[in-house]
Amino acid sequence: MKYRKPTKAIITDAGCASRFLPITKTVPKAMLPIGAKPIMQLVVEECANAGIEEIIIVATAEGKPIYEDYFYNAATKIKKQLASQGKDDRYAPIADLMELPKIVVIEQDPSYPYGNGSPIASARKFIDDDEAFVALYSDDVVFGTSDVKTLIEAYERNPEAKAVIIAQKMPTEVLNKYGIIRLADEERMTLHNIVEKPKIEEAPSNLTSYGRYLLTPEVFKYLDPRNTGLDNELWTVDAITRLVEDGDVIVEKTRGKWLTTGDPKNYFMTLLQYTMDHEDYADDVKRMINEQY
């Protein structure tokens, strides 16, 4: 069966983010700032730039009202205050925020097991049976491109595919930290399976899979709360690997640069990359680093 081109995206931030405690006991991890925007907004903008029309954010019960306030509240009181001070231009970032595509915030089903597949499964009712969709992890940030656009373009070239996943080449010395792709056909770039955190010498390639997927509704056959895997968790990559049994899963290399914000070190590295690329004080940061270290 051929499915309609994606117009919806599921973005997940439903974990407890224990590596960021204590801040994440109050603030969802994807609401941590990169510049003046939270991580989540960068991921939402990636979807918007690819033409996605509706975004489903899957959050914890505590995080849901925080996301709703951020994406729904136009802050009219702040707008009036800025206008009274002759600083109307400072409201522009909020005005831009209100122009993003339709955003729905839901809570992850509390009955589902722990695992990165459970937030996606929780959004099942928002996906029509005849449409493909995009799924993203909010702790993955991509610079220089929209992976979502790359996914959609690859799907248009391969309309019979059961899924399309994004990959990035990584240095050999870090292959044991990620999910590494084994290709079934290197010429056609089709997936055989994903090996989680292999020994470096046993890694099947240097292609790392991360949280950018184009999926068809067939994935929900396998993304079932009863289909837990390692550590009794529900894993998205397990479901994607099962899709290979039904047809091609296409592997597409990113055209940009992927960085994760999943722990304090990598969050800082992502923040630094963003600063160097986008902030007008980047030269000041470089100068400080050179002078101090």
Image: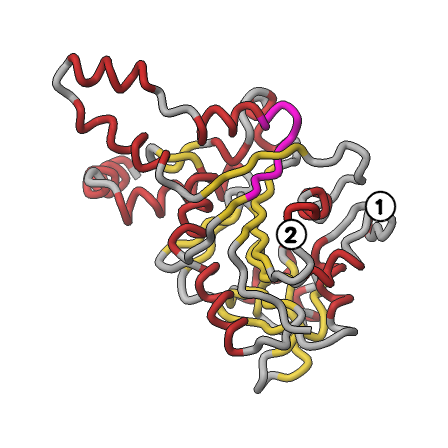
Find the magenta span and give its range: 56-64
Secondary structure, mark 1, is helix
Q: Quadrant of the C terminus?
A: top left
Kind of residue indicated by mark 2: Ile
- Above or below, 239 against 182 in this view is above
In the image, taking residue 255 as reference, residue 278 lies left or right, namely left
Badge 2 local density, few (<14 within 10 Å), some, or many (20+)?
some
Asked if disc 1 and disc 2 are in contact, CB closer than 8 Å, the reply is no
- Above or below, 119 against 190 in this view is above
In the image, taking residue 177 as reference, residue 89 lies left or right, namely left
**First in residue order: circle 1 vs circle 2:** 2
Give residue 204's mark.
Answer: none
Residue 191 rendering spot, x and y as whole percentages: 66, 74
Residue 268 rendering spot, x and y as whole percentages: 43, 39
Badge 1 local density, few (<14 within 10 Å), some, or many (20+)?
few
Q: Farthest bottom residue?
A: 187
User: For mark 1, what is the residue?
Assistant: 232
Residue 147 rendering spot, x and y as whole percentages: 46, 60
Q: Residue at x 81, y 34 (%)?
A: 111
In the image, taking residue 11 as reference, residue 162 lies left or right, namely right
Q: Which residue is nearer to you in this view: 216 or 117?
A: 216
User: For mark 2, what is the residue?
Assistant: 127
> Would residue 197 be seen by someone viewing this image from the given angle?
no
Residue 73 rendering spot, x and y as whole percentages: 42, 24
Please state which of the two labelled residues, at mark 1 or mark 2, is closer to the viewer: 2
